[in-house]
Image: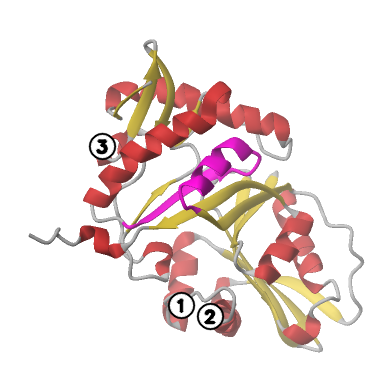
Amino acid sequence: MTIVDFTPSHIPAASALALADYREQQRRLPALPAVEEGLDLAPFAAAGLGVAAFEGGRMVGFLSAGPPFDNAFGSTRCRGVFSPMGAHAAASEQRGPVYAAMYQRAAAKWVRAGALSHAVALYAQGEEAQRQFFQYGFGLRCVDAIRPMEPIDCPPPKGYSFFELPPAQFSSVYPFEELLDRHFRESPTFMARPLESCDAFCRSCMAEGDRCFAAAFQGRLCAYLKLSAKGETFLSPSPRYRHITGAFCLGEHRGKGVVQNLLNCAIHSLEGEGCTHLGVDFESINPAAHAFWCKYFSPYTHGLVRRVDERILDPLPL
């Protein structure tokens, strides 16, 4: 096996390999929508942090990443790199050895670029590739999940109302963002993400075209759901796909079907507009989120992360 730098000349073969990989996962998980093209690999080739694997002149894998970025996951002071879904693939007959060789070469580039948090999104059903990354010290951190735009079988709880908020009322759900931030900081999640102000939250929602849905009990809001046309994978540009980017329910209203019916409210609206799939991403280290979303959504990617010892950047002593 020969490992070389990933260049623009490799994009056609890499795109074909990535699309074949996705279609294999789609056969395993029919909830995934059909796609005609994958991720645009040109920016990843331009970043200069990728590698490609060849055997007998045939590409058997590639592993690319975007440019390094500060504050990995928005909650660390560590510089990171991320290889998302579609920015890597390996031939099905030898995924473990191919990924092993590719990461060894690519990781050297990533560390030289000062990136000590290495993240890669692997298909949830790709056990062989995951085992190889686990062997290299990676751990599960994030999950992407999906469901068809179909209602959840859950009777509406009495006394609750569910509705979409107009943009002028987005500020009314900001307190739930604050509560969600507090929840992230608790054990075992320990995420100290930066929380934007209410004004910034509202401006961001309107600029991105986000939509907010809410549940109320006796006239008081008790849960919210925020949806975006943008998500974490190359599925998100589809006009028929929407992504959940925020959700929270007050503790005293949990276990009553409130969030399920809030989802149904959003699903009813989106399905009537021609949307076919609803996605969500969440931290696997957040037990409440993992338990809830996996009941109603099918995981299709696992985000694996490795944190490299910062001292590796220190010069060797003379």
Q: Label 1 to label 2, Cα distance in Å? A: 6 Å
Closer to us: 78 or 254? 78
From the image, state whether disc 1 or disc 3 is nearer to you: 1
Residue 231 seen from this side: no
Q: Are marks 1 and 2 in contact (CB under 8 Å)?
A: yes
Q: Label 1 to label 3, Cα distance in Å? A: 32 Å
Residue located beneath label 3 in the image: 46
Dot label at residue 192: 1
Identified by mark 2, the residue type is Arg
Residue located beneath label 2 in the image: 185
Residue 107 lies, in percent from the top left, at 33, 44
| Residue shown at the point (80%, 50%) measured from the top left | 150
Dot 2: few (<14), some (14–19), or many (≥20) neighbours within 10 Å?
A: few
In this view, 315 is above or below 104: below
Q: Quadrant of the N terminus?
A: top left
Closer to us: 70 or 304? 304
For the residue labelled by badge 2, is the local secondary structure a helix, a strand or a loop?
helix
**In the drawing, does residue 130 fall left or right of residue 99?**
right
N-terminal label among 1 and 2: 2
| Residue shown at the point (51%, 46%) measured from the top left | 135
Identified by mark 1, the residue type is Ala
**In the drawing, does residue 191 fall left or right of residue 115?**
right
For the residue labelled by badge 1, is the local secondary structure a helix, a strand or a loop?
loop
Identified by mark 3, the residue type is Ala
Residue 303 lies, in percent from the top left, at 53, 52
N-terminal label among 2 and 3: 3
Residue 98 shown in magenta: no
Q: Are marks 1 and 3 in contact (CB under 8 Å)?
A: no
In this view, 284 is above or below 273: below
**Which range of residues does the magenta coloring cover?**
116-138
Q: Quadrant of the C terminus?
A: bottom left
